[in-house]
Amino acid sequence: MKEYTTESIRNLALVSHSSAGKTMLAEALLHFTGATTRVGSIKDGTTVSDFEDEEVRRGLSLSTAVIPVEYKDHKINLLDTPGYTDFVGEVISALYVADGAVVLVDAVAGVEVGTEVAWSYADKFGLPRFLVVNKMDRDNANFQKMLAQAEETFNARFIPVQLPWGEGENFQGIIDLMSMKAYAGAGTEAQDIPAEYADAAEEARMALVEAAAEGDDSLLEKYLEGEELSAEEVMRGLKAVVMQGDYVPVFAAAGEKEVGLVPLLEAMLALMPSPAEAKPLPAEDANGEPVELKADDSAPLAAYVWKTTADPFVGKITYFKVLAGTMHSDTRVWNANKNTEERLGTLHILRGKEQIAVKVLHAGDIGSVPKLSETGTGDTLCDKSSPVKVAMPEYPTALYRVAVVPQSQADSAKLGSTLTRLCEEDPTLSWYQDGSTKQTILQGMGDQHIDVAIRKARTKFQLNMDTAEPKVPYRETITKKGQAQYRHKKQTGGAGQFAEVHMRVEPNPESDYDFAWEVFGGAISSSFQPSIEKGIKGVMKHGVIAGYPVVNVKVAVYDGKEHPVDSKPVAFEIASREAFKLAFQNAAPVLLEPIYKVRIIVPEGNMGDVLGDLNTRRARVQGMDTEKGRSVITAEVPLAEMLRYTTDLRSLTGGRGVFEMEFSHYEKVPAHLQQEIIAERQREQAEGK
């Protein structure tokens, strides 16, 4: 592959809902530009983008693939992202390093939830974008209807730069409003616009010129004075309004049939920014001061790692974007996040799974390097002499969790390290050990997301796991004062054991645990205090009424007895354990459950169903609002009621509802439920023994 400088590079993310045709559009562009000899098929698992075994098996993209398309001495790095909302982390990473977004809409299905999610992130990162109405060859395809739907859904102004030449089975090409010519098939040869489309094309052309004139004051003046704008002036004005986000150009295509490709490629070069023109990513220097990274070869090196993957044959592959300076094979670079030096081997440009070795990558380009030992997603590689850190985008919090159980002793040994590697690859995956339930929890964006992670653990890391429903991490506490005493006496020949402890417990909302020593007159030697505390903490860790950790208690030891010979630390530890259990039982113990703050965004038509469903989940609705024509509900809901909410909300709203949740606080479990939870826990503990 040729070497491309900054001005000749375009980094564009292909985003949409699942099945809008991103992968096949990339496939068609590769074939049309001569990079491949035939168009692959999703059904046969032969596309360049979907090369992972799991993607072939499911017939959909699960991770972002880099597809460089060479056209007219330019390189367009297409980032083909997954459309299924469980894999939104991949979409965020791709949009973050892209300089523009190409949003695809199925000409029949229209704007779906995945499209809306991707659009909102493109908004967040301030990316210029195209709307491509794809699959225009499908029965019932309707360009104008899709355009109207987009205008209704998104807070943006759309301007067609093309009209479809026919629709459905009659779709044969596009009418280009820039050149006022018609292009059949892929669009290599221009011809006159068919007479029946002349009026519509003329009208749409006027709207296009008017939009372009807004991009430049001098053009607007010329236009208002009734002068004709040249094709170059229209293009210049249009690029300005696209870059500012004032307008979104609309295209028509049928990717799989290779119809409408040339005008789309031409527009990518003419209207989308090169890395030098794009908005720089936020970064800071060694002192934490903000720095602006310009895509310039002469600047010090700064490269952001946006993705890492594990390959069973090559090892770890690190994907990066050179934000400033140039990156060379076989050199040393500084990882500013880990404060360590990394030695680079051969740099590659990836085309799907194919690795094309290169000696140098210029500012703005996207490449990969294998076998970096310390570097992970979100790190910045730079010159040691001018260290810089690029900020990582914000990823959504996990919505779906499962408990994972290793199948064998060997699996158990590598569980932690493998889960850590999986989570390094995907910032929307995380895992932790829950101390109160003794479960290992893996959490992500949905059931498919977790399922893919578990399969990946098996095929790539040879780790076999089973999944179970996660238990809710309840807590135990008390609601009033209680006291008790316990005497431990053991006489079995030889040295005996003796200890007596008098203890009081009371609620302590300020802290999880406070201890007071109120023993006077030497009834118990203070040397036994550590043993007494050890006994109390042992019980607090494992619980009293249902085996959950105890919180928010103040414990006071106020009296007791000891024996000059038989009192030993272990005796006081045992006595304090039992005294604490009795005092706790006398202090009206209750269970606490975790409450999460939940924000749900749904179409207005689903509002009633969602509210009704929330009422069955013991939710306290905090507020209702509307945002861009959609209903927003905020509520506080117990975690026990939210374990499978991702799946339930999708079925309630036809996949159009989204939500986010974060931990808020603990509160008392209703009495009628508390008895059930305690009985269930006691049954589990009995079975465990």
Image: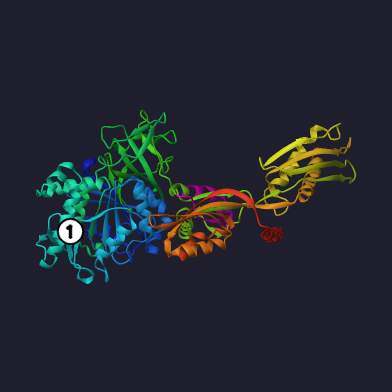
User: Which residue position holds label 1?
Assistant: 204
Where is residue 555 drawn, in percent x and y? Answer: 75, 41
Where is residue 4 drawn, in percent x and y? Answer: 22, 43
Query: Does residue 140 appear in the picture of this structure?
Result: yes
Label 1: how many Cα within 10 Å (few below 14, some 14–19, many 20+) = some
Query: In terms of depth relative to the viewer, which is nearer, 89 or 251?
Result: 251
Residue at x 18% of width, y 42% of height: 217
Give, as a three-letter code, the residue at label 1: Ala
The answer to whether residue 160 is magenta is no
Query: Does residue 47 appear in the picture of this structure?
Result: no
User: From the viewer's perspective, is 493 left or right of 438?
Assistant: right
Q: Residue furthest front?
A: 225
> The C terminus is located in which quarter?
bottom right
The answer to whether residue 413 is magenta is yes
Query: In terms of depth relative to the viewer, which is nearer, 578 or 651?
Result: 651
Say which element carries label 1: helix
Query: In terms of depth relative to the viewer, which is nearer, 479 or 352?
Result: 479
Residue at x 37% of width, y 50% of height: 121
User: From the viewer's perspective, is 607 left or right of 469?
Assistant: left
Magenta segment, which residues? Answer: 396-422
User: From the viewer's perspective, is 600 left or right of 273?
Assistant: right
